[in-house]
Amino acid sequence: MKYMNYQKIAFVLILVVGMGLFDIKSADAKNAFIKAPITTNSPDITQSSSFTIAQITEASYPLYGSWKLTYSVNGTVYKGYLIMRGYYGDLRVSYFDPEIRKKATIDQKMKLMSSSQGLVLLGYNPVYAGTSISHPTYAADNFVFAVQPDGSLVAFTCDDEKRCSSVDMEFVK
């Protein structure tokens, strides 16, 4: 089994930190910056108000079940089937590949992690479906799933090339 490298873990950490893009904040989130009063000698520098520090850690509890996932990147719809068996799982994704001008299907491994923003699934080793042949252009998918205080589920993905989308999920079993 291949393990994710530090660059990928750093990217996902940045993904979780940058979740202000999706306006997701933890209930205890505080602004990391305090705006100092501006004097006549001070330059006008504005700070991001959505900056949150988050860490990715090992998940405390395993996740079991199957879900249908639907998301879109640059107008291309991706349909996935996720099966989680504890701390690891598999995701099969089908999409229209413009390079071959037909439907393509890939399999990738998933690792369950946790953050202050919710559960994190790190994708790795995308291969042609049913084979062990690495896909040369498919960027592994990474997901964040969070149940909000009102009970609603928020899910989004950013792949290893930093293309992001919200995700529709349907629990299968």
Image: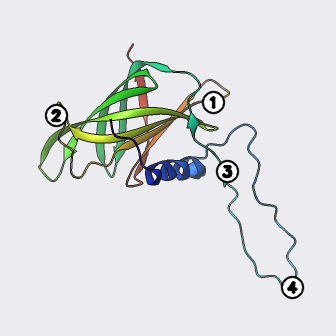
Q: What residue does disc 2 label?
A: 131
Mark 2 or 1, nearer chain start: 2
Given the current orientation, which residue lies at the most extreme bottom position? Answer: 41
Callout 4 secondary element: loop
Q: Of the residues under marks 2 and 3, which one precedes in the sequence?
A: 3
Horizontal placement of 150 versus 73: left or right? right
Which amino acid, by three-letter code, is at mark 4?
A: Thr
The disc placed on residue 52 is 3
Looking at the image, which residue is at 37% across and 30% down? 69
Cα–Cα span, label 4 and label 2 = 65 Å
Specify the quadrant that holds the N terminus: top left
* Label 2 environment density (alpha carbons within 10 Å; few <14, some 14–19, many ≥20): few
50 displayed left or right of 106: right
Check the image and report above or below for 94 versus 137: above
Where does the C terminus fall, quadrant-wise?
top left
Which residue is the site of mark 4?
A: 40
Q: Amino acid at mark 2?
A: Thr
Cα distance, mark 3 to mark 1?
Answer: 17 Å
Residue at 67%, 50% in the rendered image? 53
Closer to the camera: disc 2 or disc 3?
Answer: 2
Toward the viewer: 18 or 71? 18
Q: What is the x, y in percent for residue 8?
A: 44, 50
Residue 148: numbered disc: 1
Q: Earlier in the sequence, mark 4 or mark 2?
A: 4
